[in-house]
Image (spheres, helix red, strand yellow):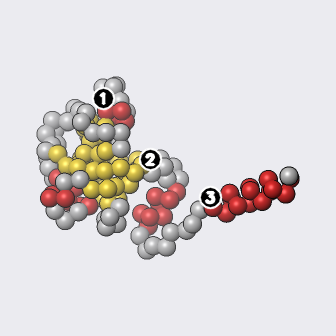
Amino acid sequence: MFAVIVLFLAALAATCSATPVASNDTFVNAVVKRATRPGTASFFDTGADACGGFDQDSDPVVSLPTNLFGLQSPSPHCGQAVTIMNTQNGQVAHGVVRDECPECGISELDLSRSLFLELTPSLSAGVIPISWFFDSEGP
């Protein structure tokens, strides 16, 4: 019986071990080390934001879903830097939390037009698959 348990644990460890990611992109290595969140991103028209400012479409604005943004005003996430990767093409962009997205689901971000276009060549994509993290989250 002991041998069966040891064999099971060895097989489990072999299937759960981390596989290194071969890439020249330092973002991929950073993603492996940080608490990443998979999800989707869309874009929105900026203006007055939930952090008390006014943004333009050319600003790298990230709008968090309400469950992450929180109910406190202003949110403790206001001004927090975010790194986002389009998981279809590997493009990486950096934004700042400035707004809340009440329509967004738990794994969705809304981005300013310019930030969205850093991740994909056209707004016609509408929604893209992403992986993202708060830059302040440690490795």
What is the three-letter code of the residue carrying label 2?
A: Ser
How far is mark 2 from mark 1, CA to CA? Answer: 18 Å
Quarter of the image for residue 99 reads top left
Residue 25 seen in this snapshot: yes
- Say which element carries label 1: loop
Q: Earlier in the sequence, mark 1 or mark 3?
A: 3
- Say which element carries label 3: helix
Residue 114 seen in this snapshot: no
Residue for badge 3: 16
Residue at x 35%, y 61% (from the top left corner): 87
Label 3 packing within 10 angstroms: few (<14), some (14-19), many (20+): few
User: Mark number for residue 74?
Assistant: 1
Quarter of the image for residue 85 reads bottom left
- Say which element carries label 2: loop
Most distant residue in the top direction: 72
Q: Position of residue 40 (x, y in %)?
A: 31, 50
Residue for badge 2: 136
Residue at x 14%, y 58% (from the top left corner): 124
How far is mark 2 from mark 3, CA to CA? Answer: 27 Å
